[in-house]
Amino acid sequence: MPTNLPPEYFEVQERYRAAKSPAEKTACLEELISTVPKHKGTDKLRGDLRRRLSKLKTAAQTRKGVSRQVSAFRIDKEGAGQVVVVGPPNVGKSALVAALTNATPEVADYPYTTWTPTPGMMPVENIQIQLIDTPPLNRDFVEPESLNLIRRSDLILLVVDLQTYPIQQLEDTIAFLQEHSIAPRRLKGRYSEQRRLTFKPLLVLVNKNDDESSDGDFEVLCELLEDDWPLLPVSATTGRNLERLKQVLFEQLEIIRVYSRPPGKEADLSAPFVLKKGSTVADFAGKVHRDFLEKLKTARVWGSAEYDGQMVGRDHVLHDGDVVELRI
Ligand SMILES: Nc1nc2c(ncn2[C@@H]2O[C@H](COP(=O)(O)OP(=O)(O)OP(=O)(O)O)[C@@H](O)[C@H]2O)c(=O)[nH]1
Ligand SMILES: [Mg+2]
């Protein structure tokens, strides 16, 4: 227990202990949290208190039946892909989402700042990728909905802090995800087929690599890591490597952009259709309009065809940047 707690803390603590109703307890606990000074020495205490508050609120919601309402953890996919930003407390998950998207999650110099997920849209060239800031992963209190959010996503961005035991953070988080049946896709071959796991593409961001002075630390980290993780050193504060991150995410999501060319007109190159890599003309037609898929007679392709405007069949595989004219 830190020694430098103010007298109000102990006064409110008395009231909290005496409180009977859940509403009274919740109010006292919120007040108690506000009396704790924010610094490293009180990290654990604040974490514990906020966990207790979260449990009280969850219990109250379940009683009221509110849990049947739409949960904050159910976030519809938007844009070209949904990427969840996960990791231990205080590594800079919220700072990264704030730096990369239009969202403004709270960023603070103490752990357990984020309690609900926040989605934001990140522009990459002429498309948008959805990033979701999430509460820190924590063994003492696991929000089952948080794990479902990760399972539904298209990609996991695991953030660790270069300045605070990044190897342990990485290994602990991977172990934690595995305990909840979530594993990196690249390790698929290592698991027996019996285990029912959800495999996800996963990229590790080593955050707080603010400038050249920390490159040495990053190199040491790479040497010490036993496994060959896909790592990207970044900094939410200075913006280092964030453009590279956007490109890597685009590649990892395995998507292509295809443009529709109405007959006799030019294609709108600012409004691509986003498809999975390997998609065909028929897949594209289905995305443009259901009628197109059924009635499609011919298609012409600019880009991946042998020559511009070549007639192709429904099974022609499209590539990033192709322009397609569908005729019904
Ligand atoms: N030097 C440096 N500090 C950073 C960087 N990114 C985040 N921080 C700081 O790290 C602290 C934690 O940042 P947050 O974004 O709140 O971290 P978080 O992972 O969302 O934390 P929780 O919500 O508690 O899990 C804040 O003081 C940030 O200013 C970075 O790239 N470099
Ligand atoms: Mg946060």
Image: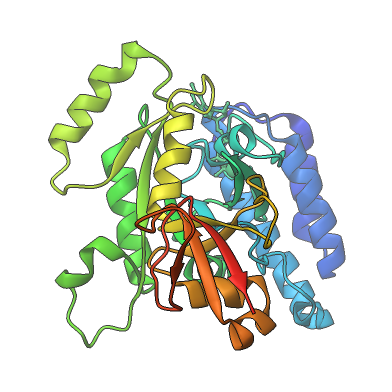
Q: Position of residue 195 (x, y in %)?
A: 26, 83
Q: Position of residue 102 (x, y in %)?
A: 71, 39
Let me know if residue 158 appears in the view.
Answer: no
| Residue 6 versus residue 324 in the image, above or below | above
Let me know if residue 234 appears in the view.
Answer: yes
Is 82 or 45 nearer to us in this picture? Answer: 82
Is 11 or 304 nearer to us in this picture? Answer: 304
Tell how many labels.
Answer: 0
Is 224 or 229 nearer to us in this picture? Answer: 229
Residue pictured at 56% horizontal, 39% vertical:
125
Is 189 or 93 nearer to us in this picture? Answer: 189
Residue pictured at 64% horizontal, 39% vertical:
101
Q: Residue 194 sits in which quadrant?
A: bottom left
Q: Is residue 125 left or right of residue 164?
A: right
Residue pictured at 64% horizontal, 80% vertical:
328
Q: Is residue 149 left or right of residue 248?
A: right
Q: Position of residue 175 (x, y in %)?
A: 30, 61
Q: Position of residue 10 (x, y in %)?
A: 73, 40
Q: How is the image coloured?
A: rainbow
Which quadrant of the figure shows ligand 2?
Answer: top right
**Which residue is most to the top?**
213
Q: Residue 99 sits in which quadrant?
A: top right
Q: Is residue 33 left or right of residue 322?
A: right
| Residue 181 versus residue 224 in the image, above or below | below
Residue pictured at 80% horizontal, 78% vertical:
69
Q: Is residue 80 left or right of residue 205?
A: right
